[in-house]
Image: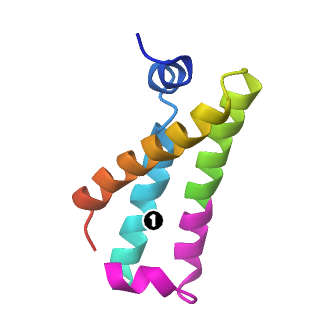
């Protein structure tokens, strides 16, 4: 059996919104000719990129807050949650290269 926080995320499609926002971000970056190496020190760009970035961050925060609200959050979940989200987004980086 999975951990309760992971079961919640999987059962209620908790990562879907994060993935949609991340795909939108990757598409905006590609449309504006950004490369992977540009992302480490990106300080300017079209507003659409920063709106998409904020959407990703907001989606992650929303899921984190849902887990906290339902009492599924603790210090172990904190590190596992971030790793889980990172792995999901890394897979999307491969599917949506710049």
Residues drawn in magenta: 34-54
Q: Nearer the viewer, residue 36 or 48?
A: 36
- Give the residue furthest to the top: 1
Residue 83 pos. (x, y %): 45, 45
Horizontal arrangement in the rendering, residue 74 relative to residue 4 (left or right): right
Is 50 a magenta residue? yes
Which residue corresponds to the image point at 49% horizontal and 54% vertical from the top-left? 21
- Mark 1: give few (<14), some (14-19) or many (20+) Cα within 10 Å: many
* Residue drawn at x 65%, y 53% as measured from the top left: 58
Q: Is residue 33 left or right of residue 59?
A: left
Instruction: Report if residue 34 is visible in the image.
Output: no
Residue at 66% across, 47% down: 61
* For residue 39, above or below residue 10: below
What sort of colour scheme is used for the picture?
A: rainbow
Any magenta on residue 46? yes
Please give the name of the residue rendered at 23% of the width and 56% of the height, measured from the top-left corner. 95
Task: Give the x, y percent position of residue 76.
Answer: 59, 32
Q: Secondary structure at mark 1?
A: helix
Task: Tell me residue 91's x, y (percent).
Answer: 29, 51
Q: How many numbered discs, if any?
A: 1
Residue 75 figure quarter? top right
For the N terminus, which image quadrant?
A: top left
**Residue extending furthest toward the bottom:** 44
Examine the residues drawn in magenta and state their main secondary structure: helix
Q: Which residue is mark 1?
A: 25
x and y percentages locating residue 25 in the rendered image? 45, 65
Judging depth in this view, the residue of 39 and 1 nearest the camera is: 1
Query: In the picture, which quadrant includes the C terminus?
Result: bottom left
């Amino acid at each position: 059996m999975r951990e309760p926080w992971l079961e919640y995320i999987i059962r209620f499609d908790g990562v879907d919104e994060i993935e949609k926002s991340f795909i939108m971000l990757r598409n905006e970056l590609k449309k504006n000719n950004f490369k992977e190496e540009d992302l480490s020190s990106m300080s300017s760009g079209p507003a659409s990129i920063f709106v998409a970035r904020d959407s990703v961050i907001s989606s992650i925060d929303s899921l984190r807050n849902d887990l906290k609200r339902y009492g599924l959050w603790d210090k172990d979940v904190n590190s596992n949650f971030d790793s889980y989200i990172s792995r999901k987004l890394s897979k999307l980086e491969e599917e949506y290269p710049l």
